[in-house]
Image (cartoon, grey):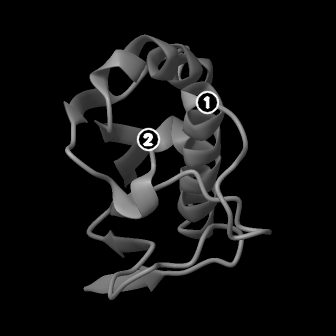
Amino acid sequence: MKQIIQTEQAPKAIGPYSQAIKSNGFVFASGQIPINPETGEFVVGGIAEQTEQVIKNLSRVLEAAGSGLNRIVKTTVFLADMEDFAAMNEAYGKFFAEEPPARATIEAARLPRDARVEIEAIALS
């Protein structure tokens, strides 16, 4: 059984996918990009500000599913440029100082709407 998760507190899906799916004790959160859900626009700033917005968006999706950042077991970070890794890592670390989840970081040729960072997550529900 699966439950589709949808919240107005995070950016709407920009294609035929769900913000998250809750199934068998897990939440599978789709990749988030640095869109401010109130304006529909990217946040102003560099990779640190974009990373912070992405994680805030993930947090809101997870909360809508009855989970949270502290229940994430795995993330995948997609960067448009691996040169942004250190700044992304520093911003990311502010949210996962204790018991950080497993993570993979990948440089992608291009991300949706030309974002510099996208992050997806798997969490316990």
Residue 42 lies left or right of residue 121; in this view the side is right
Estimate how packed mark 1 is, as few (under 14), some (14 to 19) or many (20 or more) residues with alpha carbons within 10 Å.
few
Estimate how packed mark 2 is, as few (under 14), some (14 to 19) or many (20 or more) residues with alpha carbons within 10 Å.
many
Q: Residue at x 55, y 35 (%)?
A: 51
Residue 105 lies left or right of residue 18; in this view the side is left
For label 1, the residue is 46
State the image coordinates of residue 7 (x, y, percent, origin top left).
Answer: 63, 77
For label 2, the residue is 116
Q: Is residue 123 in view from this perspective? A: yes
Which of these two is toward me, 94 or 69? 94
State the image coordinates of residue 105 (x, y, percent, origin top left).
Answer: 25, 29
Specify the quadrant of the image occupied by residue 35.
bottom right
Marks 2 and 1: in contact by CB < 8 Å?
Answer: yes
Q: Quadrant of the C terminus?
A: bottom left
Specify the quadrant of the image occupied by residue 49.
top right
Residue 14 vertical position relative to residue 71 in the rendered view, above or below = below
Q: Is residue 68 in view from this perspective? A: no
Query: Which element carries disc 2, helix, strand or loop?
Result: loop
- The kind of residue on which mark 2 rests is Arg
- The kind of residue on which mark 1 rests is Gly
Residue 16 lies left or right of residue 98; in this view the side is left
